[in-house]
C-alpha cells in the first residue's frame, strides 16, 4: 500500500490585486487636499494689485501691457497701418504679450504668427489650466495653486533680474530709452510677465471668482453698472468687484511711482514676485474643503 506524501501548505503568492493600496504620506495628502473657498477672494485681490504694478511698469518702459490684452490687441491692430510712427515695432511687443499670455508655446518663426493667433484664441492660458487640473479636484488643491503661483513668482523674478541688470532697456527716472534702434531683447521680459499673468486669471476661474479676473476691468465695469442689486447693503459680489478696481488702480499708481524713482523698474517686478511668494505660502497653509463645499461657486457663497 502506497502512502501519499504529505503536502506542504504553501501560501499563494500575493497578486497585485490582493495588495493593499499604498498609503499617501501626510505631506502628500496635505498638498492634494482641495481648499475651502472661504476668503479665496483675498489672494485674488492681491493678484489684481500685482497686475496693476506690472502693467503700469511694463507700459511705461516698453509700451506694451502684460496683463491687459485688450489694449495689446488694439496696439496690434494699429501696427497694420504702421502706427504709432514713433514705435514702428510696437505691434510686435503686443503680439508677444498676447501669445505668451494665451498659450505656453513661444513663436518659432515669423510665418507661424497667423497659426499662433488661432492657437491663442482657441487654447487660452493652456499651460496653467492644464497644470492646475493635473492634481485633480478641478485645480482647487493646495499643490495646484501653490505650484502655479510659484512659477509665476519665478518668472517675475527673472524679469526683475533682466531689468535690474540692465540687460533690457529701462527708463532712467522720467527719461525713457531711445526708441531707435528697436531693442528686441525687450520681448523677453514681456513674454515672461505675460505668461505668468495667465496663471492669475486661470486661478480666478478655478476658484469660482469670475468677478475678479485679476487682469482686466472692462467686464467688471459692465457687471457693476448692470447689477440690479448694486445699491443693496449686502452684496458681496459687488464688493469684490469694487475692491478689484481699487486694487488694480492702486497697483498702477505704486508701480508708476516706484519705476520713476531711484529704485527703478526692476524693483517693481521684485516686489511683485515677492508678493506672489507670500501667496504661495498662503495657499500651502489654506484650510481644507469642508463637507458640502465641493464645487461651491459664488452664486451660493455670500461671504468673501
Image: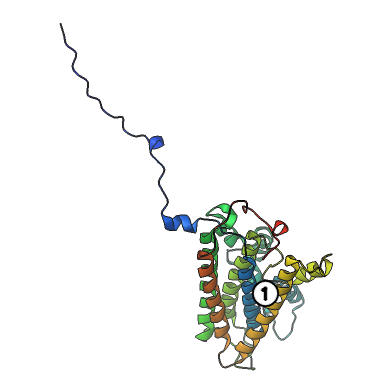
In the rendered view, tell whether residue 288 sits above or below residue 153.
above
**Residue 169 location in percent, x, y?**
57, 86
Residue annotated with mark 1: 94
Residue 67 visible in the current orientation: yes
Measured as percent of width and height from the top left, residue 288 is found at: 54, 58
User: Where is the C terminus found, in terms of image quarters?
Assistant: bottom right
Taking the image as shown, residue 127 lies to the left or right of residue 25, namely: right
In terms of image quadrants, where is residue 21? Answer: top left
Instruction: Give the quadrant of the N terminus.
Output: top left
In the foreground, 202 or 12: 12
Query: At x 73% / y 66%, what residue is drawn?
Result: 236
Which corner quadrant of the image does residue 163 belong to?
A: bottom right
Relative to 190, does residue 286 appear above or below in the rendering? above
Residue 167 in percent (x, y) is at 52, 84
- Residue sticking out furthest to the left: 1
Res. 110 visible in picture: no
Q: Residue at x 60, y 70 (%)?
A: 43
Q: Identify the element where label 1 is drawn.
A: helix
Residue 50, image x, y percentages: 62, 76
In-image side of 191 versus 222 (left or right): left
- The residue positioned farthest toward the top in the image shown: 1
Amino acid at each position: 500500500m502506497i502512502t501519499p506524501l504529505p503536502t506542504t501548505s504553501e501560501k499563494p503568492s500575493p497578486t497585485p490585486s490582493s495588495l493593499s493600496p499604498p498609503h499617501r504620506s501626510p505631506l502628500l495628502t496635505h498638498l492634494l487636499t482641495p481648499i475651502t473657498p472661504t476668503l479665496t477672494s483675498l489672494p485674488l485681490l492681491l493678484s489684481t494689485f500685482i497686475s496693476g504694478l506690472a502693467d503700469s511698469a511694463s507700459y511705461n518702459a516698453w509700451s506694451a501691457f502684460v496683463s491687459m490684452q485688450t489694449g495689446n490687441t488694439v496696439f496690434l491692430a494699429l501696427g497694420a497701418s504702421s502706427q504709432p510712427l514713433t514705435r514702428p515695432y510696437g505691434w510686435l511687443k503686443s503680439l508677444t504679450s498676447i501669445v505668451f499670455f494665451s498659450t505656453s508655446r513661444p513663436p518659432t518663426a515669423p510665418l507661424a504668427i497667423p497659426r499662433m493667433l488661432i492657437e491663442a484664441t482657441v487654447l487660452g492660458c493652456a499651460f496653467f489650466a492644464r497644470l492646475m487640473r493635473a492634481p485633480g479636484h478641478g485645480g482647487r488643491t493646495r499643490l495646484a495653486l501653490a505650484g502655479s503661483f510659484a512659477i509665476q513668482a519665478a518668472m517675475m523674478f527673472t524679469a526683475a533680474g533682466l531689468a535690474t541688470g540692465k540687460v533690457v532697456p529701462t527708463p532712467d527716472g522720467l527719461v525713457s530709452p531711445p526708441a531707435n534702434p528697436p531693442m528686441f531683447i525687450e520681448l523677453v521680459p514681456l513674454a515672461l510677465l505675460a505668461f505668468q499673468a495667465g496663471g492669475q486669471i486661470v486661478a480666478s476661474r478655478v476658484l469660482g471668482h469670475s468677478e475678479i479676473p485679476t487682469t482686466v476691468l472692462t467686464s467688471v465695469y459692465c457687471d457693476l453698472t448692470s447689477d440690479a442689486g448694486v445699491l443693496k447693503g449686502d452684496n458681496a459680489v459687488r464688493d469684490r468687484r469694487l475692491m478689484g478696481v481699487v486694487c488694480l488702480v492702486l497697483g498702477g499708481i505704486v508701480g508708476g511711482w516706484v519705476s520713476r524713482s531711484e529704485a527703478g523698474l526692476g524693483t517693481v517686478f521684485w516686489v511683485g514676485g515677492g508678493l506672489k511668494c507670500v501667496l504661495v505660502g498662503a495657499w500651502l497653509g489654506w484650510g481644507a474643503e469642508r463637507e458640502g463645499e465641493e464645487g461651491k461657486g459664488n452664486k451660493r457663497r455670500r461671504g468673501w
